């Protein structure tokens, strides 16, 4: 009992701080979304009916979706390489995947700008050797956004996959080939299904994090690549439009929470062998 | 060809190489440009010079914003470390039902998209008069970094053998002594790790700072943001390099601390 | 017996409706080696933890040297303990580990150093002081734990399955070593184990735990030769049980299925009971029985050669399987064949009649 009481005092400051400076503000935002300028759901109605907002929502979901797909396609062989490499190479690969994790997203976006823009390294090189006459549009468009985002989010796909693959017993695939499956069938029938929990976790992590992305699309995207987080920022920063911004934030919050709940449920069900 | 091990091995090699280029190229480019002697962005640079580092340290805009970042980072990391470690300790000895609830609450800022946190905090802090103030920025950074400290320390406590505390008590150590002599030394690498993590995150933080800062109180990342949106001034590369070196330095200290904690102290 | 150093009076620990331990009564004499033996979940560790102070009893009281222990917190109890898996502090050297209890008691440094050296020497680890626990083998870590628990000369030494993590050979070696240390130091020891052989080898007395209660307390010999409950007879050593009902109970003896045995506890006629006979107390003969008092007839099912002895498994007429153990010389003299008839006989002093619960 005494120990329990003492525990409460230890955790109380953190709980109070998060409660006052985080939970309350989010609740305040929620209240704003249904009370500005008058009480009602008009802000939500506007988001889900006006084509500019629907367009931004569509952008957000498609960019997040394509980022997830690319991360999966690229992350899978990388994770596989990590598991099946000699220790030194594995350490090197982990280091390489984690390096961007330790560099500011701002720094990385800036670097991509330097590399990709009209007078950037790639275009300079290509025009210099005479391969192209006009610089290619590599940035301030969807391509730039995806290049930047996949790089940042790759670790979230690679590490869940890696941890699952590392636990897969190599003898399963050997057994399958021994039972007459050719290597490709053995891969699709045995290895891939065994990797599924890692793939699922990684995909959901990447997708959810992508939904709220702000810096990369803002710096590397064009006007046609505006995502929901940018819209929230612009609404508040440029127009002081709390009505729409708060409603957008709540839409993002609910979307993220629903996805998160869905994934936890899915993983729990899988864990029970359903 | 599809079944040959050499084909697949070769493919893996290519993918690994691609990965290395994709992940490292931006960083390498920044490093090289930051030492460029050219007056504007060009690659490869015509020669070596430290002009951009000189510019960075002579331009009051950069020195002031860098210093502001430090003034936010140090207190917020310390507060987040103390509160996060205390919370992790408390949660590790709490009844599971409550612990799950509280843990979820404290981890929320990590799960919820930062833009939401930023907008919400901005809205409320403006009312409270914390907008554009150092305490406001510090508080906001504590909110963002506390989950990292807590999860790092919690992960360490999960593998911490609680019977060691029992053993200390049995040897005659009162609870606080047992904590100070046994628990704390054993979790201190994780606490340090959490603090370094918090420092790096605070130093690199942009979104919340973007909302809360004003031209007078402005962290370096916000300054970089507005500069990058304008043009690609190579001075940014120098600052980016400093930011990166700071992260690397933190990583190095973390590694050293981990190694040292495994060595024998004499009697 | 002089005044007991440790008294457990009616102590119990309830977790909600579940009794982890109940009605535990035990007096331990100074210098005695008492073992708590029982399967996991039988309450033996719970009881030890109550003595150490990690668990508060929900009823009853514990006294050490006549003083109630309950109000004294763990760190003031002056009781040494060797933990399961040792619980050595991984960030301290071996010497620092052993010095820790002395430091907590404010023993001055030179004296501390001397006593640590003595303790290390006692457990045969002189010169290992600067090592880290993880640099030692399991057996060596075990000794460090022992040194740490004894260095401050506690009034009582508790050991919670201290040898559980060691392999069989090392375990047997350490058993002897702990016994020698106990003899030399004269410390009172409470020892918890689930290994009955270990308990028989080491203890002055054994308390057998089952379902949170003490089934029986006694010397190893008493527990083996004169078990009072079916559980004790079954848990310690191997026993044959022949089920039936108590007939013609008469003071110390009674009959079950017509056979005479010693009544372990007072049982009335008609009570469901078993007749318990140790395999080595059964005498086997080939052929049919002449139908005497303590005789059983059956068929040889299997003969197992064990080197120094032979095990004969015999199926009785009602299907009960009975095991008889014969020394090699005796076994050679008895011509048994699987499938052939055999007769078992035993002395009524060797048969115990126990309530069948």
Image: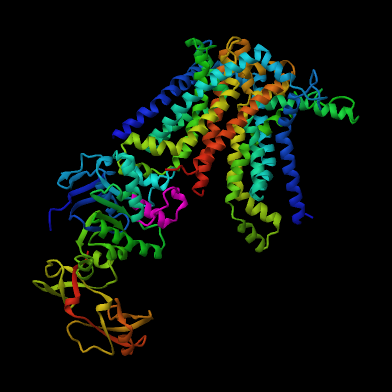
Looking at the picture, tell me which residue is in the foreground, B159 or B10: B159
Looking at the picture, tell me which residue is in the foreground, C92 or B207: C92
Image quadrant in which you'd find residue C270: bottom left
Looking at the picture, tell me which residue is in the foreground, B59 or A135: B59
Q: Is residue A142 above or below residue C328?
A: above
Q: In this view, does C196 lie above or below B115?
A: below
* Image quarter (top left, top right, bottom left or bottom right) of the N terminus of chain C: bottom left
Residue occupying the far left of the picture: C251
The picture places residue C203, in percent across and down from the top left corner, at 25, 62
Q: In this view, does B142 lie above or below A157?
A: above
Q: Is residue C285 visible?
A: yes
**Tag count:** 0
Colour setting: rainbow
The picture places residue B145, in percent across and down from the top left corner, at 52, 27
Residue A262 lies left or right of residue B97; in this view the side is right
> Does the magenta run of residues contain C297?
no
The picture places residue A71, in percent across and down from the top left corner, at 67, 38
The stretch of residues the image draws in magenta is: C123-147
Residue A33 lies left or right of residue A117; in this view the side is left
Point 33% across, 61% down: residue: C177
Point 67% across, 24% down: residue: B240
Q: Is residue C83 visible?
A: no
* Image quarter (top left, top right, bottom left or bottom right) of the C terminus of chain C: bottom left
Looking at the picture, tell me which residue is in the foreground, C3 or A100: C3
> Does the magenta run of residues contain C131?
yes
Image quadrant in which you'd find residue A135: top right
Residue occupying the far front of the picture: C110
The picture places residue B195, in percent across and down from the top left corner, at 51, 29
């Amino acid at each position: 009992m005494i120990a329990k009481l003492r525990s409460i005092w230890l955790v109380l400051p953190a709980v109070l701080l998060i409660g006052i400076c985080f939970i309350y503000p989010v609740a305040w935002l929620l209240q704003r979304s249904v009370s500005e300028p008058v009480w009602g759901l008009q802000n939500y109605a506007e988001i889900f009916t006006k084509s500019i907002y629907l367009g931004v929502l569509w952008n957000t979901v498609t960019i997040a979706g394509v980022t997830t797909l690319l991360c999966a396609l690229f992350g899978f062989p990388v994770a596989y390489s990590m598991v099946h490499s000699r220790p030194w190479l594995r350490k090197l690969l982990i280091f390489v995947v984690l390096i961007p994790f330790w560099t500011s997203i701002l720094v990385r976006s800036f670097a991509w700008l330097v590399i990709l823009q009209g007078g950037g390294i790639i275009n300079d090189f290509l025009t210099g050797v005479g391969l192209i006459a006009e610089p290619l549009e590599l940035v301030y468009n969807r391509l730039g956004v995806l290049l930047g985002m996949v790089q940042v989010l790759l670790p979230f796909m690679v590490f869940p996959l890696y941890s699952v693959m590392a636990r897969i017993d190599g003898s399963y695939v050997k057994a399958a080939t021994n039972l007459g499956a050719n290597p490709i069938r053995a891969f699709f029938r045995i290895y891939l299904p065994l990797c599924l929990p890692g793939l699922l976790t990684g995909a959901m992590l990447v997708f959810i994090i992508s939904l709220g992305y702000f810096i990369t699309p803002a710096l590397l995207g064009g006007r046609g690549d505006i995502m929901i987080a940018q819209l929230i920022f612009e609404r508040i920063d440029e127009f002081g439009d709390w009505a729409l911004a708060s409603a957008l934030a709540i839409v993002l919050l609910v979307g993220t929470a629903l996805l998160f709940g869905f994934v936890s449920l899915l993983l729990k069900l899988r864990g029970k062998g359903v | 060809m599809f079944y040959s091990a050499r084909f697949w091995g070769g493919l893996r090699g290519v993918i690994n190489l691609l990965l290395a280029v994709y992940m490292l190229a931006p960083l390498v480019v920044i490093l090289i440009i930051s030492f460029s002697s050219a007056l504007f962005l060009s690659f490869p640079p015509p020669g070596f010079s430290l002009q951009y580092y000189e510019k960075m340290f002579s331009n009051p805009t950069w020195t002031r914003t860098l210093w502001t970042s430090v003034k936010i980072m140090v207190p917020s990391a310390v507060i987040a470390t103390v509160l996060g470690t205390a919370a992790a300790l408390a949660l590790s000895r709490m009844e599971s039902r409550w612990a799950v609830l509280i843990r979820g609450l404290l981890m929320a800022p990590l799960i919820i998209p930062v833009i939401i946190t930023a907008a919400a905090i901005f809205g409320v802090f403006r009312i409270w008069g914390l907008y554009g103030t150092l305490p406001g920025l510090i508080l906001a950074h504590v909110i963002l970094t506390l989950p990292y400290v807590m999860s790092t320390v919690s992960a360490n406590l999960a593998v911490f053998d609680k019977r060691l505390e029992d053993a200390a008590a049995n040897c005659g150590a009162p609870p606080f002594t047992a904590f100070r002599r046994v628990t704390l030394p054993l979790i201190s690498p994780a606490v340090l790790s959490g603090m370094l993590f918090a420092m790096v995150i605070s130093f690199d933080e942009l979104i919340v700072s973007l909302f809360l800062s004003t031209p007078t109180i402005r962290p370096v990342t916000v300054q970089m943001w507005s500069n990058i949106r304008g043009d690609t001034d190579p001075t940014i590369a120098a600052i980016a390099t400093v930011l990166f070196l700071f992260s690397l330095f933190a990583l190095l200290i973390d590694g050293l601390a981990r190694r040292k904690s495994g060595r024998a102290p004499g009697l | 017996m002089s005044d007991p150093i440790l008294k457990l009076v009616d102590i119990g620990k309830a977790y909600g409706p579940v009794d982890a331990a109940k009605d535990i009564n035990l007096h331990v004499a100074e210098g005695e080696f008492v073992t708590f033996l029982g399967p996991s979940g039988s309450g033996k560790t719970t009881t030890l933890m109550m003595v150490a102070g990690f668990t508060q009893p929900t009823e009853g009281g514990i006294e050490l040297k006549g003083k109630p222990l309950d109000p004294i917190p763990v760190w003031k109890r002056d009781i040494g303990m060797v933990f399961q898996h040792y619980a050595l502090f991984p960030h301290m050297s071996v010497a620092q580990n052993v010095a820790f209890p002395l430091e907590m008691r404010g023993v001055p440094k030179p004296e501390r150093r001397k006593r640590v050296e003595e303790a290390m020497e006692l457990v045969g680890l002189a010169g290992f002081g600067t090592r880290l626990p993880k640099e030692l083998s399991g057996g060596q870590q075990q000794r460090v734990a022992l040194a740490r628990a004894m260095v401050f000369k506690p009034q009582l030494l508790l050991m919670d399955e201290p040898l559980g993590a060691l392999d069989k050979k090392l375990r047997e070696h350490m058993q002897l070593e702990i016994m020698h240390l106990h003899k030399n130091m004269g410390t009172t020891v409470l020892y918890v184990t689930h290994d009955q052989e270990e308990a028989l080898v080491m203890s002055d007395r054994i308390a057998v735990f089952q379902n949170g209660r003490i089934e029986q307390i006694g010397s190893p010999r008493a527990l083996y030769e004169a078990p009072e409950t079916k559980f004790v007879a079954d848990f310690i050593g191997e026993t044959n049980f022949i089920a039936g009902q108590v007939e013609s109970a008469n003071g110390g003896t009674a009959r079950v299925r017509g056979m005479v045995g010693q009544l372990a506890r007072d049982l009335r006629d008609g009570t469901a009971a078993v007749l318990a006979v140790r395999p080595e107390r059964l005498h086997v003969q080939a052929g049919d029985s002449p139908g005497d008092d303590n005789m059983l007839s059956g068929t040889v099912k299997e003969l197992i050669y064990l080197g120094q002895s032979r095990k004969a498994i015999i199926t009785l007429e009602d299907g009960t399987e009975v095991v008889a153990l014969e020394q090699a010389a005796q076994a050679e003299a008895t011509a048994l064949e699987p499938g052939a008839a055999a007769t078992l006989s035993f002395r009524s002093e060797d048969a115990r009649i126990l309530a069948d619960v």
